[in-house]
Image (spheres, rainbow, N blue to C red):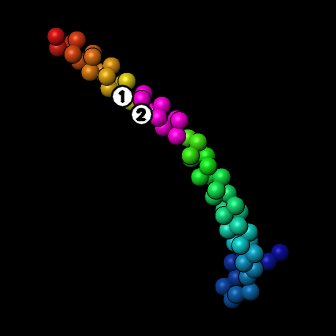
Amino acid sequence: MADTHNPQGNHDPAGSTQMFRAFVDEAPQGRQSNASGGGSRIGLILGAVVAVAVLAAIAWLAFK
């Protein structure tokens, strides 16, 4: 087993390379999932607008 904490050098960077390749391979999938999440973002915005409208109606009725 290689000692990765050895300050004198002779470390194998293959672990870092493999982690980088895994990151690069996963990046497009992450972008695709964000693009498909647009429907939920629209729902969130509409929900916020409805909540503000309901609160405004309650306030209007309370001060009427």
Q: Position of residue 13 (x, y in %)?
A: 72, 78
- Report helix, strand or loop for mark 1: helix
Nearest the eye: 57 or 3: 57
Q: Which mark, residue 45?
A: 2
Q: Can residue 21 be seen in this view?
A: yes
Does residue 40 appear to the left or right of 55 in the view shown? Answer: right
List x then y, in percent, for residue 45: 42, 33
Q: Is residue 13 left or right of residue 42?
A: right
Name which residue lies at 48% across and 31% down. Answer: 43
Compared to residue 37, the image places residue 18 above or below, namely: below
Q: Assign the magenta stretch its main secondary structure.
A: helix
Please tell me whether mark 2 sits on a helix, a strand or a loop: helix
List the residue tagged with mark 1.
Answer: 49
63 above or below 24? above
> Which image quarter is the N terminus in?
bottom right
State which quadrant residue 44 falls in: top left
Q: Specify whether 2 is left or right of 62.
A: right
Q: Which residue shows up at 56% across the image and 47% down it?
A: 34
The answer to which quarter of the image holds residue 36 is top right
Up the image or down, 27 lies above or below 37; here it is below
**Label 1 crowd bin: few (<14), some (14–19), many (20+), radius 10 Å:** few
Q: Does the magenta stretch include residue 45?
A: yes
Assess whether mark 1 and mark 2 are in contact (beta carbons under 8 angstroms).
Answer: yes
Q: Where is residue 57 in the image (x, y as percent from the top left)?
A: 27, 16
| Residue 3 visible in this rendered orientation of the protein | no
Front residue of 12 and 59: 59
Q: Within 10 angstroms of label 2, few (less than 14), some, or many (20 or more) residues?
A: few
Q: Which residue is drawn at 37% across and 24% down?
A: 50
Disc 1 residue type?
Val
Q: Residue at x 17, y 14 (%)?
A: 63
